[in-house]
Amino acid sequence: MTYDLIIIGAGPAGITASVYAARKRINFLVVSMDIGGQTAWSGDVENYTGYQFITGPDLSAKFEEHMRTYKVNLKEGEKATKIEVREGVIHVRTDKGEYAAKTVIVASGKKSRELGVPGEREYKNKGLTYCATCDAPLFSGKAVAVIGGGNSALDAALQLLKIASHVYLINITPSLGGDAIMREKVQKSGLVTVMNSSFVTSVAGDKMVKAITVKMAGKEETLAVEGIFVEIGLIPNSGFVKGVDKNAAGEIKVDAYNRTNIPGIFAAGDVTDVPEKQIIIAAGEGAKAALGAFRYLNQSR
Ligand SMILES: Cc1cc2nc3c(=O)[nH]c(=O)nc-3n(C[C@H](O)[C@H](O)[C@H](O)COP(=O)(O)OP(=O)(O)OC[C@H]3O[C@@H](n4cnc5c(N)ncnc54)[C@H](O)[C@@H]3O)c2cc1C
């Protein structure tokens, strides 16, 4: 069977696209590794219009509830691995099967950047994590390290200083970035050791993380920590989409109608080169992409 539309991803962009597609009575399928995307791991959200304050997991649950008020054909826990156009039909290959459609919206967002040091992969989810909001409560009373110096790292440090016994903030640049208000909170807490101009060289432990080695001014120092929070930025989940134009950061280039350079393939949200990565922007872009796909389907009938 050939769907009218396949939406890849169920973060704010993909979920909003699916609500718009359902309301336009498009015959569509959603393929996503999870529901909520980065919003499900955000801490406090104070900039989504209509909610002065809501937690990321609660907003994500609201998005899901809204999507499920429609009859949505959802392949949850499935990863798209390749998109190919053959004889005018777009084929989406996943780790579980293959689906065909006349149009596709790529709304696959971003994922955490890795440190790329020995021990990182071995201790992933064994004390080393990329999500402070999800995992900070597991480190009550323990010494932890946060890697990074921007808003995500500051946000992680602020969450952890209420829970951990001590927080090391390991930042590769000479001074912290991020918002001034967050920097001040971290610096005033007295519970965070900020290590500027320093970088991680390895992670060690037994069954779980026990230490991190950091290089600073040419000297290596090993810190005893039981938790490591990697907050060094995000990279677009665009590797599986070959043939579409991307910028130097790997973001998919789209026009004002969310069209890529390949007819029928649209993209929305953080995976695109649209500036500013925010929930409300991703949701709006998802709506635009669904309307763009609807227009394309009508024109090609
Ligand atoms: C810690 C943190 C805090 C944040 N706080 C805020 C905030 O306060 N306010 C704000 O506006 N924004 C915030 N953001 C940013 C916001 O969460 C993102 O801009 C937004 O979630 C992007 O939505 P998206 O749908 O484009 O992508 P994502 O949310 O990244 O969702 C992508 C979806 O695609 C799926 N996917 C990925 N690859 C594949 C694949 N190959 N096959 C199938 N499915 C796939 C994922 O499982 C996911 O469901 C925060 C982000 C983080 C990380």
Image (cartoon, helix red, strand yellow):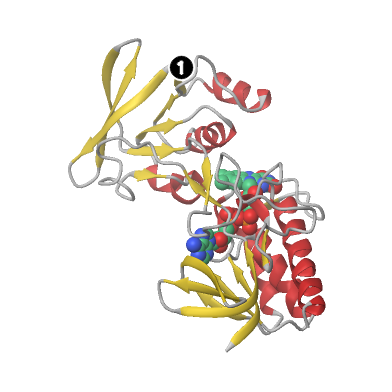
For residue 11, side relative to residue 221 (left or right): right
For residue 111, side relative to residue 280 (left or right): left
Identify which amino acid the numbered label 1 is placed on. Asn
At which x and y percent is residue 203? Answer: 27, 35
- Residue under pointer 1: 196
Q: Is residue 18 visible?
A: yes
Q: Up-down: is 103 above or below 106?
A: below
Give the residue at x 46% y 67%: 79
For residue 37, side relative to residue 163 (left or right): right
Few, some or many residues within 10 Å of mark 1 (<14, 14–19, 20+): some
Which image quadrant is residue 12 in? Answer: bottom right
The residue positioned farthest toward the top in the image shown: 217
For residue 214, side relative to residue 114 (left or right): left
Q: Give SS at disc 1.
A: loop
Q: Quadrant of the N terminus?
A: bottom right
Give the residue at x 55% y 31%: 154
Q: Up-down: is 93 above or below 260?
A: below
At which x and y percent is residue 199? Answer: 37, 23
At which x and y percent is residue 109? Answer: 58, 54
Which image quadrant is residue 151 in? Answer: top right
